């Protein structure tokens, strides 16, 4: 006699809280474990949590006794934890932006860099290598501050400016059709990429720093100070919160623009708002990481496989999963070559790509991208 064991199927209503709870628990655990990884000074996880809690403690009446050395405090708070937190911010921003673009454009191939964001950020970063050196000398500025803030600021401006240009070019009367947005993004990306190539090949100053520029373009968490991290964190938190508030609007875009219009959505206004939110998220991430590709494409798809297409669940899951993925991708990027660093963008593609293909192969017959 053959006995078959059948496990009860878990409905989406039951699965969603479980998935979100697991991701919510995995993120702080990843933050602590990744902060403890690396370096020649082993620091226990309990000490790491105490150091972080002491610095982030918003209640002055709660005192956390310092039982660790000042050296351990500096290693965690000034060296290791900022990079891990930046990784989490980048992963959340790119994943949520990817989910927004995929829902808005109804295109499963949409990623955060589709509308010219990457080419604009790359051109802004290239211009930073061209103008910041002479500007520092001419104005007598602090070279350390210019190096820390100049490139991220120009990359941020370049990313937002390119999306604004794409949206302006895609407008036909009072509308910006989805197909025109995508085509304008492709054209602007090509033009800005050509401009970047001209600057690199025709300017000796940029050419001498080509290795450093290539490293930034390939993606990698930069060493940002706490003031810079605070600004980026505030922008990303605002963008994610705004996206969550507009989750029902994103759901209506699955009906098409005509269908969304019929259910009372102001399609063109909402389209502009959503594009702006996604561009703000991507520009904020690019300013501290360079160009980290692919994560904003496949993380929303993986979350959609687990939770379905409703953005009320998809967006927070994408933010959490993207943060966890980039945290560990950055750890792997730092660990693969002793004394060297593999670009984070390379790791995100090499690790995420095969996993995503396996998921698609396994669930291909039932997967609905939007």
Image (spheres, rainbow, N blue to C red):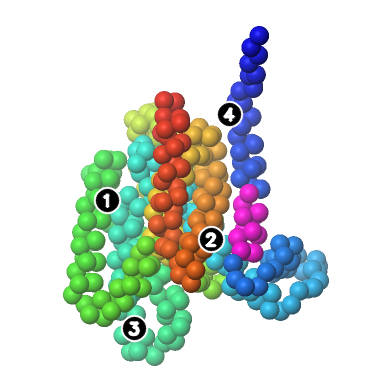
Q: Which residue is mark 1?
A: 185
Task: Name the residue tied to disc 2.
Answer: 331
Contact check, label 2 and label 4, Cβ < 8 Å: no
Mark 2 Cα shell of 10 Å, populated few (<14), some (14-19), many (≥20): many
Instruction: Give left or right: position of 241 versus 271.
Output: right
| Magenta span dominant secondary structure | helix
N-terminal of the two: label 2 or label 1?
1
Residue 208 in the image: state x and y as whole percent. 28, 79
| Residue 114 vertical placement versus 344 (above, below) | above
Q: Quadrant of the N terminus?
A: top right
Give the mark, 3 or 1, whose residue is nearer the N terminus: 3
Give the percent coordinates (x, y) of residue 77.
Answer: 64, 71
Q: Earlier in the sequence, mark 2 or mark 4?
A: 4
Residue 35 position in % (x across, y down): 62, 64
Distance Cα–Cα, label 3 vs label 1: 31 Å
Q: Is residue 105 above or below residue 328?
A: above
Residue under the point 62% across and 55% down: 30
Q: Is residue 173 magenta?
A: no
Q: Nearer the viewer, residue 162 or 74?
A: 74
Nearest to the eye among marks 2 and 4: give it: 2
* Disc sitting over residue 133 in the figure: 3
Where residue 291 sits: x, y (%)?
38, 60
Labels 3 and 2: the sequence-earlier one = 3
């Amino acid at each position: 006699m053959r006995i078959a064991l059948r496990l009860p199927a878990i409905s989406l209503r039951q699965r969603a809280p479980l998935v979100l709870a697991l991701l919510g628990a995995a993120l702080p655990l990843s933050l602590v474990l990744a902060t403890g990884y690396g370096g020649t000074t082993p620091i226990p996880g309990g000490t790491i949590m105490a150091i972080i809690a002491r610095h982030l403690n918003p209640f002055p009446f709660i005192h956390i006794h310092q039982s660790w050395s000042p050296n351990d405090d500096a290693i965690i708070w000034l060296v290791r934890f900022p990079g891990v937190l930046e990784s989490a911010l980048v992963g959340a921003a790119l994943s949520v932006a990817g989910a927004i673009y995929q829902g808005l454009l109804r295109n499963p191939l949409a990623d955060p860099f589709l509308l010219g964001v990457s080419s604009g950020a790359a051109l802004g970063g290239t211009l930073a290598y061209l103008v910041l050196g002479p500007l520092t000398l001419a104005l007598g500025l602090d070279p350390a501050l210019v190096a820390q803030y100049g490139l991220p600021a120009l990359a941020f401006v370049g990313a937002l400016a390119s999306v604004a240009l794409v949206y302006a070019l895609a407008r036909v009367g009072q509308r910006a059709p989805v197909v025109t947005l995508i085509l304008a993004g492709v054209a602007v990306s090509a033009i800005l990429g050509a401009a970047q190539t001209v600057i690199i090949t025709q300017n000796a100053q940029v050419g001498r720093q080509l290795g450093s520029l290539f490293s930034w373009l390939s993606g990698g968490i930069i060493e940002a100070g706490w003031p810079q991290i605070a600004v980026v964190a505030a922008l990303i938190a605002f963008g994610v919160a705004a996206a969550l508030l507009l989750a029902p609007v994103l759901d209506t875009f699955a009906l098409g623009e005509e269908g969304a219009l019929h259910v009372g959505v102001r399609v063109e206004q909402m389209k502009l708002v959503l594009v702006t939110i996604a561009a703000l998220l991507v520009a904020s991430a690019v300013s501290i990481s360079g160009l980290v590709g692919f994560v904003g494409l496949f993380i929303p798809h993986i979350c959609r496989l687990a939770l379905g297409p409703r953005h009320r669940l998809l967006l927070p899951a994408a933010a959490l999963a993207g943060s966890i993925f980039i945290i560990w991708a950055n750890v792997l990027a730092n660990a693969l070559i002793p004394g060297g660093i593999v670009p984070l963008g390379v790791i995100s593609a090499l690790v995420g790509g095969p996993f995503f293909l396996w998921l698609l192969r396994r669930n291909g017959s039932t997967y609905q991208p939007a």
